[in-house]
Amino acid sequence: MNMITGNVLAPPQPKTLSETGISPVMMRDILIKTMFRTHSEQVSDIAKKICLPPVVTQELIDLCRSQRLLEATGTMSATSNGEMGYQLTDAGKARALDSLAQSEYYGAMPITLDAYREQVKRQSIRNIALTRQQLLGAMGHLILPPTLIDQLGPAVGAGRSILMYGPPGNGKSSISNGIRDALGDKIYIPRAIEYAGTVITVFDPIVHTAVAPEDVGTGLRLSASRFDSRYVYCQRPTVITGGELSLDMLDLTYNPTARTYTAPLQMKSSGGVFIVDDLGRQAEPPQKLVNRWIVPLEENRDILALQSGEKFEVPFDTLVIFSTNFHPNEIFDKAALRRIFFKIKIDGPGQQDFLKIFAMMAKKRGMPLDEKALVYLLKHKYPTIDNIYANYQPIFLIDQMMAICDFEGIPYQMNPDLIDRAWANMFVKEEVIVH
């Protein structure tokens, strides 16, 4: 029976070995490797390690016993609590070592690729019904033009790719993070996936934030046994990359020592958000990065390859947000732009919004506002840069003045002299440096 946690249908726990979808040989080998590496003996402990229900774990143990790989140790152990214990036979230890030589993977049983596809459908990013209130709530700390929410709402709600562009320092990264925060529900991330006899690990504690499942109706926490514990209940994931992004990060990563694979970044972000910040600063040309995603963006499927060269399809269910300081026409051709569904320009603030941001950040930092200093800033400094305002400037100037005050041993304050000193650090003078 399927269970609904939040708004997402949970994966049902298997009741028999056959319901796992994994071959008995692979499960047998993972079990004995896990027992060999962790020295687990009781069924309850082993079940937690391999993430199967105790009744299914017992069925797997009985299979190994029939093959003389395990033997019962009885219930005399001080830590057994009356529970039957099991240990590897000599043949079991030999089989564990042989299996470890083929793959170091042990622990949680993987799920099948078909099961993964089904769960992705249940919790698709495209199933989210995002409201204006949710988006405003997630971005309430930002001062944005009213029309921007009108553009962002449909873009995020559609779960399609978004390109945000505009001059630097105007909150494109903050807006991307706000979009992530607006996706408030939770989903199930598989610990590992099996394909063609190989294991691909997916759950990554750096990317995925595990949470305790709760029953929405009663507020009571649900036992992990109510859903397949080969999955981890998590917040919708967010992967943020910048100038370090390269094409090989979008492919399976093979560990030649462990002989296992790690899922690529876009697969780890499935059901969530993939933010490509500072597009155009990567070693790879932006056009090349987007070309890698032509099929995924259009057909919601990705193609991955094993070391052997064998290729297979996985779902591509990620809200991709590209953020760049370049004009789109400078870094993309028309065909690439056509495949990015929403293009949103993020401009700098006008003077009125700039002053709102300045006042908000000054209050947050504990810096007293001074009207004369602000008038000096607007009338004498900004005309030198054609009155072009940016969202990053208020916090930059305030932090600079606070640092100067700390150095001079004076209370935090704002005056024309401090404005001049802070302003001098915001820009670099164009000049030729003679070597």
Image (cartoon, grey):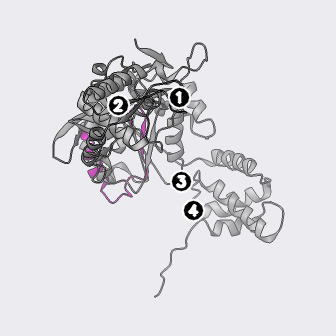
Q: Please state which of the two labelled residues, at mark 2 or mark 1, is closer to the viewer.
A: 2
- Do the residues bearing badges 2 and 4 touch, measured as CB atoms within 8 Å? no
Asked if residue 395 lies left or right of residue 22, the reply is right
Q: Is residue 355 magenta?
A: no
Query: For the N terminus, which image quadrant?
Result: top left
| Residue occupying image coordinates x 30% and y 54% | 257
Give whichever of discs 1 and 4 has the lower sequence position: 1
Residue 39 image label? none
Q: Is residue 22 visible?
A: yes
Residue flagged by tag 4: what amino acid is it?
Answer: Ile
Secondary structure of the residue carrying tag 3 is loop
Per the model, the C-alpha gap separating discs 2 and 3 is 65 Å
Residue 399 vs residue 251, the one in the foreground: 251
Badge 2 marks a residue whose secondary structure is strand
| Residue with the most extreme bottom position | 435
Which one is nearer the viewer's eye here, 176 or 250? 250
Between label 3 and label 1, give the one nearer the viewer.
1
**Residue beneath label 3, please?**
169
Q: Which residues are magenta?
A: 270-294
**Relative image position of residue 30 (x, y in whole percent):** 32, 36
Residue carrying label 1 = 184
C-beta proximity under 8 Å, tags 2 and 1: no
2 or 3: mark nearer the eye: 2
Asked if disc 3 and disc 4 are in contact, CB closer than 8 Å, the reply is: no
* Sequence-earlier tag: 2 or 4: 2
Label 2 sits on residue = 71
Marks 1 & 4, CB-CB < 8 Å contact: no
Give x and y (percent) for residue 331: 32, 53
Q: Secondary structure at mark 1?
A: loop
Q: How many marks?
A: 4
Q: Nearer the viewer, mark 3 or mark 4?
A: 3
Real-space Cα distance between discs 2 and 4? 80 Å
